[in-house]
Image (cartoon, grey):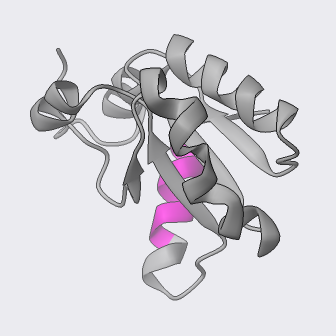
């Protein structure tokens, strides 16, 4: 399931009001996160480490929270999305177009690279 940049921005706004029903996971590499990040990102789990680090998300699955993944343009997060689904996560979303689309459609202050 995909989530649009506008929908993610809305959810992040609701989180500020106390509605914390999701976790936002960046699957890019650390050097990319140094360039740009979506405010409110909870975890950085680079895709090459995803299989090993996915256990960090188990408690969110048990709590019934949605896991939203993103990368630069959507390719790596689509892979992470598939890994989560195959490992029993039912509430998973992939940010459409990644951080580039988020910058275009929801928060132009986020740098593009």
Q: From the viewer's perspective, is 55 left or right of 63?
A: left
Q: Quadrant of the N terminus?
A: top right
| Residue situated in front as seen by the camera: 63 or 50 | 50
Image quadrant in which you'd find residue 66 = bottom right
Q: Is residue 62 above or below residue 103?
A: below
Which residue shows up at 76% across the image and 24% down it?
82
In the image, which residues are magenta? 6-13
Q: From the viewer's perspective, is 73 left or right of 107?
A: right
Which residue shows up at 46% across the image and 69% down it?
13
Image quadrant in which you'd find residue 63 = bottom right
Asked if the magenta segment contains residue 70, the reply would be no
Q: Quadrant of the C terminus?
A: top left
**Majority secondary structure in the magenta region:** helix
Query: Where does the image place residue 72, in percent across and percent down from the top left?
Result: 37, 20
Which residue shows up at 64% across the image and 33% down it?
94
Q: From the viewer's perspective, is 33 left or right of 11?
A: left
Which residue shows up at 50% across the image and 75% down it?
15
Q: From the viewer's perspective, is 107 left or right of 48?
A: left
| Residue situated in front as seen by the camera: 66 or 54 | 54
Q: Residue furthest front?
A: 52
Q: Is residue 81 above or below residue 65?
A: above
Query: Where does the image place residue 81, in percent across and percent down from the top left?
Result: 69, 30
Query: Where does the image place residue 92, in percent across and percent down from the top left?
Result: 75, 44
How many marks overall? Answer: 0
């Amino acid at each position: 399931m995909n989530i649009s940049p506008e929908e993610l921005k809305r959810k992040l706004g609701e989180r500020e009001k106390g509605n914390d029903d999701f976790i936002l996971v960046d699957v890019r590499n650390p050097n990319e996160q140094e360039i740009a990040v979506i405010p409110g990102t909870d975890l950085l789990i680079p895709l090459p480490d995803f299989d090993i680090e996915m256990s960090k998300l188990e408690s969110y699955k048990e709590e019934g929270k949605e896991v939203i993944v993103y990368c630069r343009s959507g390719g790596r997060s689509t892979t992470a999305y598939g890994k989560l689904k195959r490992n029993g996560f039912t509430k998973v979303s992939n940010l459409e177009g990644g951080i580039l689309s988020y910058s275009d459609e929801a928060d132009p202050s986020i740098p593009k690279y």
